[in-house]
């Protein structure tokens, strides 16, 4: 008999299934992962967080009482790490200006010079003017200032001798509050009107859009000035501030509604929306469950880009005296001191609130651009 050697079975190839390193990522995780790659978007996010913290804890970050008076139009005090002999020291200090014993040969006025003999030492978490943290907790600690409680003016003083830096930090609370409140009202009204108009369409959409076009046709700046001038000057501060917010909101929602309406018109023709209509879903459920989540990405980007425009508008109206009245403090109200060229030329540090406005506008615009790029692929 012939013995036939049976051929060995072919080797089995085991298929290795590699599991994905990442699990299922949510929409927010996808947007955040893409936003982190944008350095401008992250820079804007960091600045926005710092601005909000500064506004919330403004009394803590302000080195002085914004209502305390000192020498009018005092120049900014520069922080130094050297003593009067020029030796390096670890603890920073500032040197105040004082009148010397020498007289000017022309005006016979005392010559103002730097007082090197009485330095004001600086430190963190120092004691200063008393305030209420978040309006509730009594406190007297400040983030940075002089250790002995002496006045320090890092950005100089205004015509009444009030510290410009402290007033700018406290003013951020009012300016950002106005911007965030106006944008919140504009977003709610504009998003609701835009979704309802784009979803129902027909005659309702035609007449509603004619009203929106009527609002958009008004010249906004003259209308702002006319409406804000209707309220009496003797009205309480809270009433005047509420009226300004109402005027800005009434004239700002129309553009948001047109943008949301355009997105809704495209979404209303998608298959899953038509399928929801076919199975008998209510209009409210379709709008809230299918259309609203899909327009939120556009709304979030529009909000971050609309806040800087409101900050600029408040600053402009405050400069003209139509936004905030004393004793409240805002960046626009502080810019009223720059109304004359002589003041700007002689005391340029009065323009310091412009720097806060520019940083705020850049922060929200950078964050808006980063969010727009992050939500586009999804």
Image: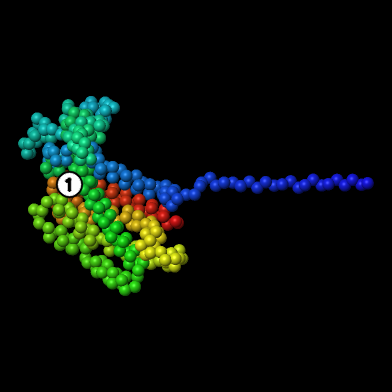
**Residue at 25% of width from left, 60% of height from top?**
252
Report the number of discs. 1
* Residue 255 at x, y percent in the picture: 29, 63
Q: Is residue 294 left or right of residue 62?
A: right
Q: Secondary structure at mark 1?
A: loop
Residue ID for mark 1: 329
- Is residue 289 positioned above or below 44 on the image? below
Q: Is residue 308 left or right of residue 23?
A: left
Q: Is residue 217 left or right of residue 285?
A: left
Name which quarter of the figure residue 135 lies in.
top left
- Is residue 114 positioned above or below 43 on the image? above
- Please identify the quadrant where the C terminus is shown: bottom left
Name which quarter of the figure residue 249 lies in.
bottom left
Q: Nearer the viewer, residue 257 or 45?
A: 257
Residue farthest to the front, as pictured = 280
* Residue 300 at x, y percent in the picture: 35, 55
* Residue 314 at x, y percent in the picture: 21, 54
Pointer 1: residues within 10 angstroms few (<14), some, or many (20+)?
many
Q: Nearer the viewer, residue 5 or 109?
A: 5
Name which quarter of the figure residue 346 lies in.
top left
**Residue at 9% of width from left, 31% of height from top?**
102
């Amino acid at each position: 008999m012939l013995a036939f050697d049976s051929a060995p079975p072919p080797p089995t190839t085991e298929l290795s299934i590699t599991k994905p390193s990442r699990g299922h990522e949510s929409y927010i995780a996808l947007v955040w992962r893409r936003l982190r790659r944008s350095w401008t978007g992250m820079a804007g996010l960091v600045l926005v967080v710092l601005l909000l913290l500064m506004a919330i804890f403004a009394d803590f970050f302000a080195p002085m009482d914004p209502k305390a008076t000192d020498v009018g139009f005092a120049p900014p005090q520069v922080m130094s790490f050297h003593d009067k002999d020029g030796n390096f020291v670890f603890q920073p200090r500032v040197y105040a200006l004082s009148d010397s014993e020498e007289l000017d040969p022309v005006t016979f006025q005392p010559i103002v010079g730097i007082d090197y003999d009485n330095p004001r030492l600086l430190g963190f978490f120092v004691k200063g003017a008393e305030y209420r943290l978040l309006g509730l907790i009594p406190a007297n600690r400040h983030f940075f200032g002089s250790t002995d409680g002496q006045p320090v003016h890092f950005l100089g003083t205004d015509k009444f001798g009030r510290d410009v830096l402290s007033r700018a930090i406290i003013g951020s609370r009012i300016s950002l509050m106005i911007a965030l409140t106006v944008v919140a009202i504009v977003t709610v009204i504009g998003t609701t009107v835009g979704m309802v108009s784009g979803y129902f369409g027909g005659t309702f959409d035609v007449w509603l859009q004619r009203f929106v076009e009527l609002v958009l046709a008004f010249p906004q700046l003259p209308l702002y000035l006319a409406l804000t001038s209707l309220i009496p000057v003797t009205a309480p501060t809270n009433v005047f501030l509420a009226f300004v917010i109402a005027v800005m909101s009434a004239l700002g929602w129309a553009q948001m509604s047109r943008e949301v309406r355009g997105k809704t018109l495209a979404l209303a023709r998608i298959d899953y929306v038509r399928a929801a209509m076919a199975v008998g879903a209510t209009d409210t459920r379709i709008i809230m469950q299918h259309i609203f989540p899909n327009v939120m990405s556009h709304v979030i980007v529009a909000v971050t880009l609309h806040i800087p425009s409101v900050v600029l508008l408040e600053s402009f109206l405050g400069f003209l005296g139509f936004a905030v009245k004393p004793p409240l403090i805002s960046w626009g109200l502080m810019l009223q001191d720059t109304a004359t060229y002589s003041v700007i030329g002689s005391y340029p540090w009065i323009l310091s609130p412009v720097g806060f406005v520019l940083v705020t506008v850049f922060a929200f615009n950078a964050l808006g651009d980063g969010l727009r790029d992050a939500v586009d692929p999804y």
